[in-house]
Image (tube, helix red, strand yellow):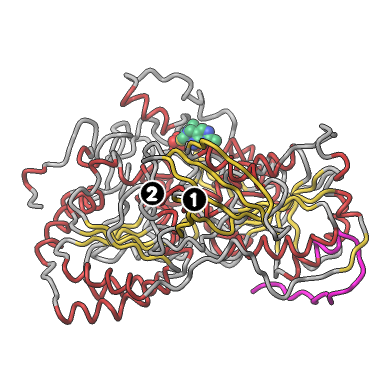
């Protein structure tokens, strides 16, 4: 689907700025999101003539998250571009976000002329220094002839191994200087050589361990999606017949409709998913990283389980949880190798998983993730999200902000396909959802894209609706308007005696979201009665030539359950306020 | 013993010291001493780092260090002798 660019011959004379654009074309970039300014201005002149589509955003943070949404939907590197100083620092949050969620991103920033670096020049910021902690790598380029090499390396580093964000900061004089174009035919980095193929011994050890286990669980993380390994995962699960949990970053990696799928583990995970990890004798960990939001109190996490940990990043092994069998490599290769190895191991010894599966599936049926409708007949936020999922269907791409609505969107929408659920998992970036939806729609123009956003989150990045309206990017946005910073308010309800310090957004009417949407060139709708819910969603579904924003005015006090309070053990999971599951009736 | 000496070959490029020291700072690893010098290859510098583990694992320190693209290789020095870091997994060439 990538745009076909006319290749530029090496040795062609041009300035650094043109060589930057020709390099992006050589890297097969078809779209980038950005906003110009003085230091990057030389690059915007050749951008004007390029076959690359440049989408002019209204805030650089929007460019960064849009590039992320694009990357998460397409699996290709997302590209964003900004000027020096404040333009570059506006990319800091998206870069950190992409680092936490292993998203392949290439950010290009203009820098003040090399002679001015270090002089506190106008719009000078040490963006390379600022982004060092959370980029996979970054560059400061001060010579025109170094531009193609840096761009080639940036794409290589961003998209191979464990994907991640790479920043290329280019001094203005390097963009202006004359040079000859020279795109490298080969990239060699002495210090970078990611291991793709897992070693045979670790595959054999993993297969042997699985074939001994009576209580195994597949603990599936976002790495499965990055590696495009869903098909292989499905085969592996069928082969063993063990239960599966998918983390917040892995929703869609394995179909929710599958009977062995227990849902999401972690702080707001299902009882069955959380408990299966706690009671397992083996975690088959695939592209997950034992994040504290999944493990709860680490010392009481899965204490009786042996651990197989398959990941492309060696530094994840033994970081939080000891791995009995580490397997380092690309997950698609790993799972593909594990299938025949496990077949052979199971032929010798095939433990009966029936009792384990029965007890876990009983938990799944006894404690489905659910919600109660508000007593006063007002609109339920969970019902809104659930109905959007049902009406829009499983080919829809969903993004979300961060907060209660995010957790409900992960719980009450059924995900059947990888790359249909995009959210800010590791960083928890409020404001991610709307620009990410914009990028997702650009990457998958034929798919319906819904941003499930909070009223708080929406107010952080809604300016990109203008970008959507003017660039024919017809996304749909559901504002779950509970006139609150709801997730923080929930913590205040539970842990601060209901002292709601600075979490009320005061009003469901200010701002007037539909009018705000209309002002930005979108269709604005609203809904506050349950009886209007389906008709409103269908109305939004029927508009495909313009962005649509729906203000769903929902009950304020709804809470996200189940919950494992931060820092406590997963064994202390609550299904409602002060209500634990009835463990006595379960056999585990 | 929680003090280990690592000999780290790195790309000789501006900012590489910040990359290494920044990694140690943000992951709360303690540096006792750090010496940087040239090698026979002008593109490669050598860092000798004494790290006081204080509860961190050497394996994790090395794995995180090796994730830096500018880090080429890592060896542990024991009594002045080079001891290649454990050749089992993880693969420190990554
Ligand atoms: C940039 C940023 N600031 C603050 C937070 C802390 N935070 C987490 S959820 C949340 C509330 C979000 O409110 P809203 O978008 O209305 O979502 P709700 O929880 O009400 O569904 C806040 C403030 C954050 N995650 N990100
Ligand atoms: Mg809210």
Q: Is residue A3 magenta?
A: yes
- Name the residue rendered at 78%, 64% in the picture: A148
Q: Which mark is residue A319?
A: 2
What span is in magenta? A1-21
Q: Which mark is residue A195?
A: none
Depicted A579 relative to depicted A218: above or below: above
Q: Local crowd at mark 2 within 10 Å, few (<14), some, or many (≥20)? A: some
Label 2 element class? loop
Q: Are marks 2 and 1 in contact (CB under 8 Å)?
A: no
Image quadrant assignment for residue A32: bottom right
- Name the residue rendered at 64%, 61% in the picture: A442
Between disc 2 and disc 1, the foreground one is 1
Depicted A285 relative to depicted A197: above or below: above
Q: Give coordinates of residue A222: x percent, y percent.
A: 43, 58
Structural distance between the alpha carbons of marks 2 and 1: 29 Å
A97 lies left or right of A142: left
Q: Nearer the viewer, residue A395 or A199?
A: A199
Q: Which residue is mark 1?
A: B80
Q: Quadrant of the N terminus of chain A?
A: bottom right
């Amino acid at each position: 689907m990538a745009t076909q660019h006319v290749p530029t011959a090496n040795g062609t004379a041009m300035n650094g700025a043109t060589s930057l654009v020709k390099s992006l074309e050589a890297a097969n970039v078809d779209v980038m999101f950005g906003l110009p300014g003085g230091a990057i201005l030389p690059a915007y002149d050749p951008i004007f003539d390029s076959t690359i589509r440049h989408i002019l955003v209204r805030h650089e943070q929007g460019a960064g998250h849009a590039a992320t949404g694009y990357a998460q939907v397409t699996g290709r590197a997302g590209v964003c571009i900004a000027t020096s100083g404040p333009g570059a620092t506006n990319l800091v949050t998206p870069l950190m976000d992409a680092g936490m969620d292993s998203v392949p991103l290439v950010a290009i920033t203009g820098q003040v002329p090399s002679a001015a670096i270090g002089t506190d020049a106008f719009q000078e910021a040490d963006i390379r220094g600022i982004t060092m902690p959370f980029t996979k790598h970054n560059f400061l380029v001060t010579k025109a002839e170094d531009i193609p090499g840096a761009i080639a390396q940036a794409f290589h580093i961003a998209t191979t191994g464990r994907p991640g964000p790479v920043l290329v900061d280019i001094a203005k004089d390097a963009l202006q200087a004359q040079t000859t174009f020279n795109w490298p035919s080969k990239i060699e980095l002495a210090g970078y050589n990611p291991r793709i193929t897992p070693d045979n011994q670790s595959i054999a050890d993993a297969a042997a361990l699985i074939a001994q286990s009576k209580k195994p669980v597949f603990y599936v993380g976002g790495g499965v999606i990055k590696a495009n390994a869903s098909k292989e995962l499905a085969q592996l699960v069928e082969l063993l017949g063990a239960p599966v949990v998918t983390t917040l970053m892995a929703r869609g990696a394995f179909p929710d409709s599958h009977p062995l799928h227990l849902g999401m583990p972690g702080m707001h995970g299902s009882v069955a998913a959380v408990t299966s990890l706690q009671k397992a004798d083996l975690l088959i960990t695939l592209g997950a990283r034992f994040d504290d939001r999944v493990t709860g109190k680490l010392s009481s996490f899965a204490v009786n389980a042996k651990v197989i940990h398959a990941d492309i990043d060696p530094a994840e092994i033994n970081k939080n949880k000891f791995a009995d069998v580490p397997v380092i490599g690309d997950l698609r290769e790993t799972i593909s190798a594990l299938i025949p190895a496990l077949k052979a191991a199971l032929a010798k010894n095939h433990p009966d998983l029936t009792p384990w599966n029965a007890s876990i599936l009983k938990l799944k049926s006894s404690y489905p993730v659910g919600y109660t409708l508000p007593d006063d007949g007002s609109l339920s936020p969970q019902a809104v999200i659930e109905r959007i999922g049902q009406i829009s269907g499983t080919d829809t791409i969903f993004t979300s902000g961060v907060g209660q609505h995010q957790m409900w969107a992960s719980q009450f929408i059924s995900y059947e396909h990888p790359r249909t659920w995009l959210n800010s998992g590791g960083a928890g970036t409020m404001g991610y959802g709307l620009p990410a939806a914009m990028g997702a729609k650009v990457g998958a123009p034929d798919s319906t894209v819904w941003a499930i956003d909070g009223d708080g989150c929406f107010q952080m990045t809604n300016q990109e609706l203008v970008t959507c309206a003017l660039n024919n990017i017809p996304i749909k946005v559901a504002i779950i308007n509970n006139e609150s910073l709801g997730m923080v308010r929930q913590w205040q309800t539970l842990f601060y005696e209901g002292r709601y310090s600075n979490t009320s957004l005061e009003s469901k009417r200010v701002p007037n979201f539909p009018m705000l949407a209309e002002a930005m060139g979108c269709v604005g709708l609203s809904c506050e009665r349950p009886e209007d819910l389906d008709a409103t969603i269908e109305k939004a579904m029927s508009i495909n030539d313009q962005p649509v924003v729906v203000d769903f005015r929902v009950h304020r006090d709804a809470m996200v359950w189940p919950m494992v309070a931060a820092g406590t053990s997963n064994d202390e999971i609550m299904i409602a306020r002060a209500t634990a599951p009835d463990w006595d009736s379960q056999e585990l | 013993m929680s003090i280990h000496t690592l000999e780290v070959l790195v790309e000789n490029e501006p900012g590489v010291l910040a990359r290494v020291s920044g990694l140690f700072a943000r992951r709360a690893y303690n540096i006792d001493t750090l010496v940087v010098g040239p090698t026979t290859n002008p593109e490669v510098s050598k860092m000798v780092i004494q790290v006081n583990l204080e509860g961190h694992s050497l394996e994790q320190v090395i794995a995180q260090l090796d994730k830096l693209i500018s880090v080429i290789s890592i060896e542990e020095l024991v009594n002045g002798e080079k001891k290649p870091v454990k050749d089992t997994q993880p693969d420190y060439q990554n």
